[in-house]
Amino acid sequence: MARHLEAAAYYLDEDPERALQHALAAKRRASRLAVVRETVGLLAYVTEDFATALAELRTFQRISGSEAQIAIIIDCLRALDRSEDALKLARAVDRTSLPGEAQIDLAIVLSGIRLDRGEADRALAELQIPQLDPTKATVECVGLFDAHAEVLEELGRDEEAAKWRRYARLTEAAYAPDETLDVHTERLFTEEELEGDGVDLDTIDPAYEPPVSDEEELDELLDDVSDEDDPEEDNSEDEEAGFENEGGALDDAMADAAPAEDAPLTDSLTDAVADDEAPKE
């Protein structure tokens, strides 16, 4: 099992389909291990098999009790044209309990869903989280800044969008490696050692078929988010009220944000933020 997980990691960049086959082989040998189900789910997501990804990551969530992959689970629902279920599931998540990177990923996914639905104002509000702060930027914030710029462009606020694009590029540059490293990987397994474990090492396993994921099956995956806990009619007014105050949401989020640890800024990003905040004559 461990060698198949290693093989999945080895093939991830060069051949994601083969990597998925190795992960499925590991699943056949150890289906109750959370790390195995998580690996299968993530590789299925990479290969755009969203129904399989959803099923595997929900299983990972149940086994481990972790919500670390909640953003990808919600994005799978989005890809399967189930945006209502995605938003419903998101409302049941305690976002403050998520790691910072997961909070960022979730905000980006939810903003994308709102854009898909033509709700640009709400898309902007979804991104108003404490990490949307260029003075505490980390490498994970690059995607958040770009997503914010995209929504601002959709709203016709091009000057503000350009500012956030600039913050994204400066943050990206701040965390870029000083030099390029040539990394050579070496497998600790041989292809012969993996033969007979259900993996076709020359072609994708022709016997593999993704599980049938009809509406009923996907509904079962959401059975722990009941209508009783989150009735649509009861939430509509609160949700509308929450989005009405979008204008001050960013200021409130920044005021409440705790100082970020280990978040060095380059002089260029610091100067850019200072220039943007300086009063204009």
Image: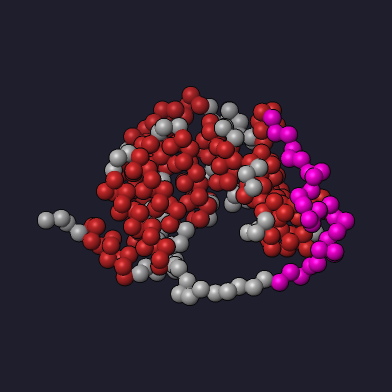
Magenta segment includes 196: yes
Residue 130 seen = no
* Secondary structure mainly formed by the magenta segment: loop
Residue 124, horizontal then vertical, whole percent: 38, 42
**Magenta span covers which residues?**
186-214
Q: Is residue 250 above or below residue 142?
A: above
- Where is residue 58 drawn, in percent x and y? 66, 43
**Most distant residue in the left direction:** 281
Residue placed most toward the observer, 202 or 180: 202
Residue 87 screen position, x and y as percent: 52, 35
Q: Position of residue 216 (x, y in %)?
A: 69, 28
> Which residue is pictured at 86% across the width and 59% down the height?
195
Point 45% across, 75% down: residue: 178
Q: Is residue 58 left or right of residue 91?
A: right
- In the displayed structure, would residue 233 be above or below residue 252? above
Identify the residue shown where x is 66% and y is 39%: 51
